[in-house]
Each structure stands twice: as C-alpha cells, then as structure tokens.
Image: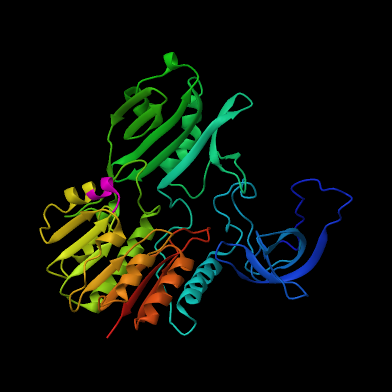
Amino acid sequence: MPPRSRQVPPAKARNKQQPSEVALVDVTALGGLGDGIARLTDGRVVLVPDAVPGDRLLIELLPQNRGISRGKIMEVVTPSSHREEPPCPVFARCGGCTWQHIALETQHAEKASFLRHALGRTVDVAIAKQPIEPWRHRRRVRLHLQSDRGKLVAGMMARASHDIAPVQDCLVLTEPLSRLLQVLPAVAQPWLKVGELYAVEGAEGVLLALHGLPHDFRLMPKAQPLLAELGVAGLTLSLGRFQDQAGLTEVTLPETIGEFPIHVDAAGFCQATEGGNRAIRQAVADALEAVGPVARIQEFFAGSGNLTALCLNRAPTIRTVERDADAVARARVTLTAAPQVQLFCGDVDELVDAAVPGELWLLDPGRTGARGVCQQATQGGPAHIIYVSCAMDTLRRDLQVLQGAGYTVQSAVVIDAFPHTPHVEAVVRLHKA
C-alpha cells in the first residue's frame, strides 16, 4: 500500500524575506524528461520532479527557468495508486534511476504515451514484450571515484549537481558490475586520488577502463595483478602518464553470438541492457520481415554492425554509413564474411547515396536525430524507412518532415529498454507509395 503522505524537506534554507508560493496540484501525466505535469489554477503548466500521475501534491513553486514553471514537492497529500516506495537507499540523491517510485506497468504505459505523442494520436503503438528484468539488468556503466573524508568512494552523479552520490550497491547493475562498487574503492584507496571508470559486461566477463590521478606514481600497481583482485576479464589504466593494460580489450555481446558477433570495449557504445538490445533487434527484424526483400538497403548511423547483420538476407547490397572510425573498424571485422556489405566512414549527411527504386533506409541515430537524412529522403527517397530512436522529441521532428513528404507510419513499437528511467526506445516503420 502506498503511504498516506510524505513530507519532503526543502533542499536549502530560503530567505525569510521572500516567502515561497505554494499550490495544491493534481498530476495528470509525465513529461519526456520524467517530471510530473500539473496545471495551476491560473492555467500555467508546472513540472514537478518525483511526481506520479494521480498524485495530489502540495508544491512550492520555484523561480521560472527559460519560461518553464517548476515545483518542488512539499507534501504528498494524496498518493497515486501508481506510486511505490523506491527500494534504493540513495534514490532521493542519485541522478540515475529517477522513476523507481513509479509502478513498472505505469512506466511502460507512460513511455508508450511518449511515442504516441511523437507519432500522432491516431497511430497504433505496440508495447514490446518486456524481456528486461526490472533489476540487475544494466551491463554498461560509468562511475566516478573521489575522496570523501579521506576514504575513496564510488558513485553516480547526484541530481542537478556536480557532486558524487556514493553508492555501495546499485540495484540496476548486473551483479559483477555492482561488485566493482564495493571492491574497487578498497583496492584503489592506497594509490588513487580521483578517477572515473567505464565498465561493460560481455560474454567473456567484465572489461574495466580506469582514468584519473594517483596519489603517487611510485605507488601504482601494474594492471595484470589487479585482474584477479578486481574480478575482471580486462583492465586498462590511464592515470596521468601511467598507462598499462592487461587481459581482454574487447568482449562479445551475448545476444549477437553467432556468425556475426558484435564486440565492444570498456568505453565504447553498446545498448546498456542485453534485454533491451534483444527487443530492439527483434523489432527491427519484424519490420524487415514486414517489408520483405528489397533492391538495396542503406543503413545510417550503423555503429559496429548491431543491426547490419539483420539485413543480410533482405537485399543483395547493403550500404552502411558511420562516422566513428573505431566502430567501422569493428564492423569490418564482424562482417568479413558478408561481401554484400559496403562500409563507409564519415559524416552521414554527406554520404547519403541517391535511392534506387524499392530501396529501404535503416536509421539508428543518437539523441540529435537524423534531420539531414530525413530531409534528403524527401527528394526522391526510398520506398521504405525503418527509424530506430532513443529521443522522442527529435523523432517527432523528423517524422513531421517525412510525413510532410508523403510517408505514412506502418507500425510502431515502444521498448522500455531502461526500467526506472524516462528513457525509451522506439522502432517505427514508414512507407511511401
């Protein structure tokens, strides 16, 4: 049962000569960045962190920032039936999983509403079957290390701050990664002053890359003996002028094991959850199946080939474009046995080739979207587009361009690849007759 009310202490003491404005509000939805949306009696919309749809809240109104009204919860007067007690002891401070207080099914529904808003309310949105475990699902992490009263601690960035929120056991990290939170500070205490680590877990184990500054270069241990002490399969040390490496430099993503496996290093990009990537790949495979064989596929923002292998039986020629040279080099190794794939490295917008009849474009951009590619699609573009997106605002912008040129949405799948965060993935298939 949710608590009847919750007192939320103010973050800072405020000037008594400037009394704060308070308001009683009802939260109706969640915004794209995860804050609750409510409306004041004068019609103003206010965004409230840590709110849940259905909450009735007493809030303190904060000074407007760039014309946006925000509020801070003073009291949960009537808690929503969708509100849950966050299990993480540092939830209120850590900037990581800001939706732990929202029931998982409600998270799924809210993320589906984000995609519906991007597509238009008349488009049907399918929610992918959720293969992602609610906890212990994150296989890639960036952590910070610093001294706290003479003791080295590891943690995430605190909310709206440059400070570190120390974490001893992160509930969303896989067990091997969470173990690093406990082991690494104790191991590095004698020689590390401040640092930052990147880690990823693959089929062969955990890779760790550690950057920072040591107390004294003379105290630095070699990487090889640290492998067993830290329980990792590979370690790269970059501490000022001290550089060393031991063990593996790459691991395999388990969901890609087969003829065309994808390899990543500790600091390289991959989907942060194995289950999330499986769901994305399945949604793309389903979209390709729905289109059927095509004359050619152009894949933009192709990375190291995570989605390329899914295209191999769909077209006689596959042309991929990616600007990250390291990612392209990995794709060349992975796709050696696929001569029909042509890999290009460079600016995506400059390497779009004119579409041939019946062609398909596969887009998987970062948060900034694919504005340039979509604009080029409006001028004699492909018959089919599959757009994989992690940012609903830029997806909406790009789809408006495509729909204005005659493309229609054929299917849309929303994927909750990152439980307990407002982050969402989507796979949208479009067609132009």
Query: What residue is at 31 percent from the left and 62 percent from the top?
Result: 349
* Relative horizontal placement of residue 324, taking residue 334 as reference (left or right): right
Query: What residue is at 48 percent from the left and 53 percent from the top?
Result: 135
Give the percent coordinates (x, y) of residue 357. 18, 78
Q: Is residue 358 visible?
A: yes
Secondary structure mostly seen in the magenta stretch: helix
Give the percent coordinates (x, y) of residue 47. 66, 64
* Relative horizontal placement of residue 92, taking residue 424 as reference (left or right): right
Q: Residue furthest top?
A: 218
Give the percent coordinates (x, y) of residue 339. 10, 58
* Relative horizontal placement of residue 135, taking residue 370 as reference (left or right): right
Q: Based on the displayed image, in which of its 4 quarters is residue 337 positioned? A: bottom left
| Viewer-proximal residue among 232 and 9 | 9
Magenta-drawn stretch contains 346: no
Q: Is residue 184 above or below residue 29?
A: above
| Viewer-proximal residue among 141 and 227 | 141
Q: Residue furthest right?
A: 17
Q: Is residue 252 visible?
A: no
Give the percent coordinates (x, y) of residue 300. 28, 62
Query: What residue is at 21 percent from the left and 55 percent from the top?
Result: 344
Quadrant into which the N terminus falls? bottom right
Q: Is residue 280 above or below residue 411?
A: above
Q: Based on the displayed image, in which of its 4 quarters is residue 37 positioned? A: bottom right
Query: What residue is at 12 percent from the left and 58 percent from the top?
Result: 338
Magenta-tinted stretch: 323-328
Q: Based on the displayed image, in which of its 4 quarters is residue 71 positioned? A: bottom right
Quadrant into which the C terminus falls? bottom left
| Viewer-proximal residue among 145 and 403 | 403
Magenta-drawn stretch contains 324: yes
For the image, the number of numbered tags is: 0
Q: Coloring scheme of the render?
A: rainbow
